[in-house]
Image (cartoon, rainbow, N blue to C red):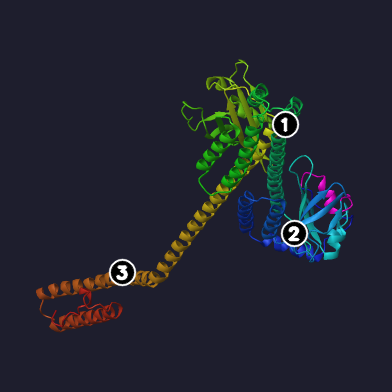
């Protein structure tokens, strides 16, 4: 991603700072989820589009929904006038879509972006030094923008752009989202071009068949010869069929034209059917199996397979396959990249047409085991990445002309987009599951914490009261032991005194005074014990009688 350049000494505007702060405060998880969901919906939608206008409209709607800018645009490059024409968009002044055109010079943002492989971001056109804002942007007051080129082939089709009225720092994820939308748009454009080419070929063949039929009505050798040489056969089967009418009566129309026209019609119908299957929501395995059956029936290759590329493990996985009559359907196997011809195609990123000539190696042995003589394999590329390979094999030697390879490439684009879309959906579901699981764990932890705090709040006073009660009970026991010791000492002294006086009864008055003093002391101890330990059940609180 190419970020904006600022003039020396330039200071970002206050609005730019506010937007930057606001952007950093937005939860990245929700923005990322919105982009992923929008991309998945856009990919499913464009699988079934039938024209460029519908495709570009879907692309601009996806940009507007995910990037939240005031203006979005899809430009198409017109090489004759050397301008970019506004084909689709949103937010622009009425009447501009379909009419506005921008110069492609590098002095403007759009022209500067057209020749670059990565998105070009401008945070503030007022401080941009690489190029100026185009008159269209100046007219609408655009301050920030991000653009990227759309390339269905080596030559760019045009570009996609998102434009904001306030200074905004488009993130790397925003630019990456726009680039993925451009890749998907380019992929579908390539498919539409292939289908259009097939329609033209079908019209040409129909006209040719009609001309040959009219020429056959006049049985002149020259007319028949001219009609037979208008179109060369495309493979060994067509060559044999084309040779047969020349040996037959000159009054019969050439038989090669009927099967050829029918084959082109079947191919066109198969391309539409594959596009419909790619847009379906059925299980991936079942969809791929229907796709290979359609391709096999339309191409005439009895052995057709779609192999998936697992980049993380560097293995090629068989997704779906048809087989020749009398042979069992292969199991869902996976092999290292270096052990299959499809792996070689995935590794190099180029189509392969192989005629088995007896050369033996690890990759060609598999073709010899199934009796294949001709092998055709194309890489499945979507959004700039290879996701698998489409393989066809035949037991006869067949010729693959440019028309056939173009048709096959269009089918490959539909299949590649299907695989990429399902992969994105799986990633999105996985992210949602992880987020939901994390949310459930957080909610469970919060509820457990709230429950613990509630229990502590409810049980706290009781625990404090019990602790205080235990402490007071301990204090009472200690004091009761002290008073008990004092009481025992007084009673022991009284017992000793009475025992000694019992032996000498001469001084009774002294004995009485001793008893009275002991009883008074006992009364004081009991009263102190009663005040300190008001528990009537405690035996130490029982006051002794005077006659004790």
**Spatial CA span between label 1 and label 3:** 137 Å
Task: Please tell me which residue lies in front, 402 or 165.
Answer: 402
Q: For residue 89, which numbered disc appears in the image?
A: 2
Determine whether 466 is above or below 236 in the image: below
Q: Would residue 490 be visible to someone looking at this image?
A: no
Q: Nearer the viewer, mark 2 or mark 1?
A: 1
Rate crowding at label 1 as few (under 14), some (14 to 19) or many (20 or more) other CA atoms within 10 Å: few
| Numbered marks: total | 3
Q: Is residue 303 left or right of residue 138?
A: left
CB atoms of marks 3 and 2 within 8 Å: no
Quadrant of the rendered image containing residue 129: bottom right
Q: Residue at x 65, y 41 (%)?
A: 413
Magenta part, dominant SS: loop
Where residue 23 sits: x, y (%)? 70, 61
Q: Which residues are magenta?
A: 104-119
Quadrant of the rendered image containing residue 470: bottom left
Q: Nearer the viewer, mark 1 or mark 3?
A: 1
Task: Please tell me which residue lies in front, 534 or 28.
Answer: 28
Determine whether 102 is above or below 220 in the image: below
Q: Is residue 163 left or right of residue 462?
A: right
The residue beneath circle 3 is 478
Whichever of labels 3 and 2 marks the residue nearer the N terminus, that label is 2
Q: For residue 218, which numbered disc appears in the image?
A: 1
Q: Give SS at disc 3.
A: helix
Task: Please tell me which residue lies in front, 13 or 390.
Answer: 390
Where residue 175 sits: x, y (%)? 72, 51
Whichever of labels 2 and 1 marks the residue nearer the N terminus, that label is 2
**Residue 210 on the magenta span:** no
Where residue 76 sits: x, y (%)? 79, 51
């Amino acid at each position: 991603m190419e970020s904006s350049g600022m003039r020396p000494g330039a200071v970002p505007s206050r609005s730019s700072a506010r937007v930057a702060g606001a952007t950093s405060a937005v939860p990245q998880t929700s923005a990322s989820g919105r982009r992923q969901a929008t991309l998945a919906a856009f990919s499913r939608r464009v699988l079934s589009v039938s024209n460029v206008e519908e495709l570009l409209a879907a692309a601009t709607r996806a940009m507007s929904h995910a990037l939240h800018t005031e203006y979005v645009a899809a430009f198409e490059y017109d090489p004759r006038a050397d301008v970019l024409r506004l084909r689709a968009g949103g937010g622009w002044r009425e009447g501009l879509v379909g009419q506005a055109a921008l110069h492609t010079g590098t002095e403007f943002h759009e022209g500067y972006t057209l020749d670059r492989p990565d998105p070009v971001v401008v945070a503030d056109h007022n401080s941009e030094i690489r190029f100026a804002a185009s008159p269209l942007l100046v007219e609408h007051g655009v301050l920030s923008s991000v653009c990227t080129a759309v390339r269905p082939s080596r030559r760019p089709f045009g570009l996609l752009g998102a434009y904001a009225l306030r200074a905004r720092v488009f993130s790397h994820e925003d630019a990456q989202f726009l680039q993925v939308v451009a890749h998907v748009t380019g992929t579908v454009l390539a498919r539409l071009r292939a289908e259009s080419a097939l329609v033209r070929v079908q019209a040409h063949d129909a006209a040719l068949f009609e001309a040959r039929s009219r020429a056959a009505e006049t049985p002149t050798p020259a007319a028949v010869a001219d009609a037979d040489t208008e179109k060369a056969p495309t493979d060994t089967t067509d060559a044999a069929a084309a040779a047969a009418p020349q040996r037959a009566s000159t009054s019969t129309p050439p038989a090669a034209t009927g099967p050829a026209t029918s084959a082109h019609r079947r191919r066109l119908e198969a391309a539409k059917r594959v596009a419909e299957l790619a847009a379906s929501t059925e299980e991936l395995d079942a969809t791929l199996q229907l796709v290979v059956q359609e391709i096999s029936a339309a191409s005439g290759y009895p052995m057709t397979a779609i192999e998936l590329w697992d980049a993380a493990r560097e293995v090629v996985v068989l997704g779906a396959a048809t087989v020749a009559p009398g042979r069992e359907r292969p199991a869902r196997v996976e092999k290292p990249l270096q052990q299959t011809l499809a792996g070689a195609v995935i590794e190099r990123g180029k189509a392969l047409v192989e005629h088995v000539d007896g050369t033996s190696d690890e990759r060609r042995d598999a073709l010899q085991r199934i009796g294949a003589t001709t092998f055709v394999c194309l890489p499945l590329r979507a959004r700039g990445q290879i996701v698998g390979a489409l393989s066809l094999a035949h037991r006869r030697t067949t010729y693959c002309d440019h028309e056939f390879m173009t048709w096959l490439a269009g089918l490959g684009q539909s299949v590649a987009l299907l695989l990429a879309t399902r992969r994105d959906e799986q990633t999105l579901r996985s992210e949602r599951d992880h987020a939901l699981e994390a949310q459930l764990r957080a909610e469970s932890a919060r509820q457990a914490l709230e429950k613990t705090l509630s229990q502590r709040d409810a049980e706290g006073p009781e625990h404090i009261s019990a602790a205080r009660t235990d402490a007071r009970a301990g204090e009472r026991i200690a004091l009761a032991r002290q008073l008990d010791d004092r009481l025992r000492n007084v009673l022991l002294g009284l017992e000793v005194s009475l025992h000694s006086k019992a032996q000498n009864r001469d001084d009774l008055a002294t004995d009485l005074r001793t008893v009275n003093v002991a009883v008074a002391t006992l009364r004081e101890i009991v009263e102190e014990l009663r005040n300190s330990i008001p528990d009537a059940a405690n035996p130490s609180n029982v006051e002794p009688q005077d006659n004790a």
